[in-house]
Image: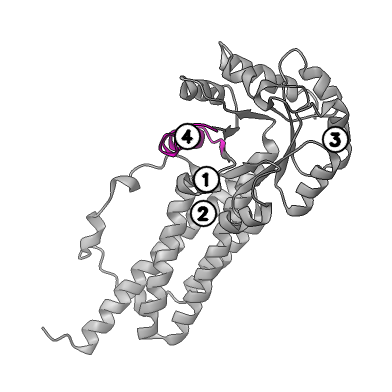
Amino acid sequence: MVLDHSHIQQTVYRILDANLDRAREGLRIIEEWCRFGLNNSEFSSICKHLRQELGIWHTVEIRAARDTPGDPGTDLTHPQEEKRVDITSLLQANFCRVQEALRVLEEYGKLDDGNMGIACKKIRYQVYTLESNLMGYQRHQLLWRSHLYLVTSPVDNLLAIVEASLQGGLTLLQYREKTADDSVCLERAMQLRQLCHHYGALFIINDRVDLALAVDADGVHLGQQDIPIAVARQLLGSQRLIGRSTTNPPEMQGAISEGADYIGVGPVYETPTKAGKAAAGLEYVKYVSQNCQIPWFAIGGIDMSNLNDVMNAGARRVAVVRSLVQSDQPTLATQYFLSQLHRIK
């Protein structure tokens, strides 16, 4: 069948119309979260500006080609489109939707107006930047709001303990596993990530940048002997969080200068989790409280009996292992820690 020029033109217009709608709708969904969820005027303004830029190309001729009743794609759907497990998946789905639509507009726009292809290519890269900045911003915002950090240790009922802690208000979890096979770690990390994102919590992987990438974790936590922060950042990108363990002021300053998003401070007390490692003590906690401008978590042997001492030394965020992992009632234990940590702003 030979298609005449008029038919081809109308088909191109229909494609442009559908994808202009798709891109603008996706941007509006993202904009609503930036406006009402984050109260962020900068991101909201960027979304609005991009919608208006696309609107310029949505001409009367293109709109006139719309044929919704005759569109075979209106009834097409996919199970993944029927449910969003959390706000992150909603945002990511709509960023993908916008980016795909812009790529279509870039290519088919060239058949109508070369300038449209150029404009949509520029907008597509602006959307990539917005996605990176927005997802990174969300993670940093939640990091700043997190006062209790659970670091896991190997136990049979780990998933139940983590979920109970999340139900108690935990918003930051680190999966730490030193001895299990990679296949076991991968499966467990995926389960924990799903739990965390279901409850709106951040999920961090200890040491393993490869595992963090494999399960789309929110970041990694690195020890002093692990890869440099700059290398981890190159692999993970700017969206994800990178933490660093520190035991003294030079290590603290080094982590900050290298671009850590947060640091661990300790061990405050001797702990079997760090067997053979001398305690950094409360003096180091006091030093960090007076000299650190990024989020930091006191860690190491902290429990309900000494929490007030750690807080009196200046800590407003703590990381715990045994206090929750070995608790008979992790939900209540989480609530207790958070109630104490929120007493002092």
Q: In this rendering, would 317 be left or right of 292?
A: left
What quarter of the picture does the C terminus occupy?
top right
Does 243 sit above or below residue 316? below
Q: Label 1 vs label 4: CA separation? A: 18 Å
Q: Which residue is mark 1?
A: 212
Is residue 286 or residue 176 the one in the foreground?
A: 176
Q: Label 3 vs label 1: CA separation? A: 29 Å
Q: Are marks 3 and 4 in contact (CB under 8 Å)?
A: no
Q: Label 3 vs label 4: CA separation? A: 32 Å
Mark 3 secondary-structure assignment: helix
Percent x, y of residue 64: 32, 75
Which comes before the other along the chain, label 1 or label 2? 2
Can you tell which quarter of the image residue 144 is in? top right
Segment colored magenta:
178-203
Pair 1/2: label in front: 1
Percent x, y of residue 72: 20, 62
Q: Which residue is mark 2?
A: 30
Pair 3/1: label in front: 1
Q: Which residue is mark 3?
A: 289
Mark 1 secondary-structure assignment: helix
Badge 1 amino acid: Ala
Mark 2 secondary-structure assignment: helix
Which comes before the other along the chain, label 2 or label 4? 2
Q: Which residue is mark 4?
A: 198
Badge 4 amino acid: His
Q: Label 2 vs label 4: CA separation? A: 19 Å
Badge 3 amino acid: Ser
